[in-house]
Amino acid sequence: MRLLLISNSTNAGEGYLEHARNDIRDFLGGEVKKVLFVPYAAVSFSYDEYQEKVQKRFDEFNVKVDPLHKYDHKDKRKAVEDAEAIVVGGGNTFHLLKQLQQEKLIEVMRHAVLDGTPYIGWSAGSNVACPTICTTNDMPITEPDNFHALNLVRFQINPHYLDAHPQGHAGETREMRIKEFLVVNPYIYTVGLREGSMFKIENGQIQLLGGKKARIFKGDEEPRELAPGDDFDFLFE
Amino acid sequence: MRLLLISNSTNAGEGYLEHARNDIRDFLGGEVKKVLFVPYAAVSFSYDEYQEKVQKRFDEFNVKVDPLHKYDHKDKRKAVEDAEAIVVGGGNTFHLLKQLQQEKLIEVMRHAVLDGTPYIGWSAGSNVACPTICTTNDMPITEPDNFHALNLVRFQINPHYLDAHPQGHAGETREMRIKEFLVVNPYIYTVGLREGSMFKIENGQIQLLGGKKARIFKGDEEPRELAPGDDFDFLFE
């Protein structure tokens, strides 16, 4: 199984997918010529616009972005099965998961990736690689059938992990939100993946890329900060 | 129907429910001696602790806080039906709604309030007064049966509404999140209720209290800022 799970599409002040471009290029490795792109997290812009935005970046890699929404419903399963790689973009996680569930693509996508199809996701696309979407930051603007996602990894990712909290605001911090998740789900590792960070998983190994530390939460243990180069294999336990 | 829907329990730097105490006192009007308190939004602290914290504030009003979780399951419906007033505290909206659904209290609570039982909610307690919980800020740490809530009002509240956005962070702003909701639900008014604000609804009238403006969203209309004293009756349409 090969996964590239990216916290965010865009670092503040940078171009779209700019921070991750070298890692995406390396991950696709020159062999992949076309990726199946899942645009279903887009809500406030069209799937076509999303395809164009991603294609613009993937042009640098000479990779064609083939969007799932342009297939007839009856051909979508086969498109997933035949994909050279699957790329799932960010946006609203609830909207993304609902659409995948409605099109009955969860299991076929899961098995394609478990069987070796490389998977790249960012933001909501990283959330749906987890067992559930329970650690998304997104607003539940629409109701999926359930919260179960692709379950490609055993742990949960909180993308766009944020230490800062607006001054004078009394709403929960990100850490408080994750700690609530841990009370209800004490045995599941949750990783706060800061903007600019990503996990690369291949050959049964997991690496943190991007320069920043990740924050690891489990049950009522004190959260830990681990850096690129540290051992993250415990996340597979 | 009488509702007091408060954005937040605590303003930064103030005591618990301090900003709302005069409005709560006025709303209970000296006649209510005991309120049924719903602590189910609490996740990282116990229901007993929650009861104590609220009781401490309600001691000022000489009102007893009678917590729903202490009733035997078979007596809970009657506790709701017989309540002098219902008070629903903040915390995690998903946890709160799930518990109310599991105990099959949604309809009995809805009808008690429609029939005149005064209702006070803050944060998650204001979210569940709406048609759905689709405009909560909370993390979906647990999965309710569905997103349908008490539906006491026709509009949606986004509590803890926030204009600020952490510098250098690329995740969505609050307004962007609400605008995603509006794309999926173009006909539903959504109110960004800033911390320190609340709606009082009684005698078929709705008032904004607390000194700050509220931000009104609908479909692709330009959001509007309305102040205390302005006419909010359109929210009943």
Image: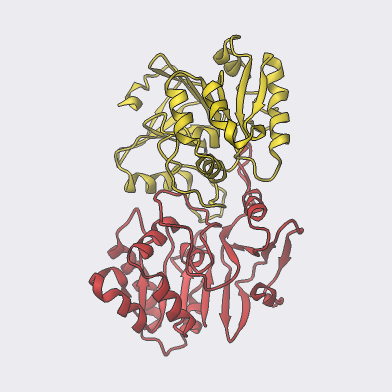
Chain colours: A yellow, B red
Across the whole image, how many numbered discs are drawn on residues? Answer: 0
Position of the C terminus of chain A, as image quadrant, is top left
Residue A109's x, y, as percent? 48, 29
Using the image, determine if residue A40 lies above or below residue A63: below
The part of the image, by quadrant, that contains residue A157 is top left
Residue B62's x, y, as percent? 36, 83
Residue A116's x, y, as percent? 46, 18
Residue B100's x, y, as percent? 37, 65
Nearer to the camera, A35 or A154: A35
Identity of the residue drawn at 52% across and 70% down: B151
Using the image, determine if residue A41 lies above or below residue B59: above
| Outermost residue, bottom side | B31
Identity of the residue drawn at 53% across and 51% down: A140
Using the image, determine if residue B189 lies above or below residue A43: below
Can residue B231 be seen here? The reply is: yes
The part of the image, by quadrant, that contains residue B73 is bottom left
| Outermost residue, front side | A74
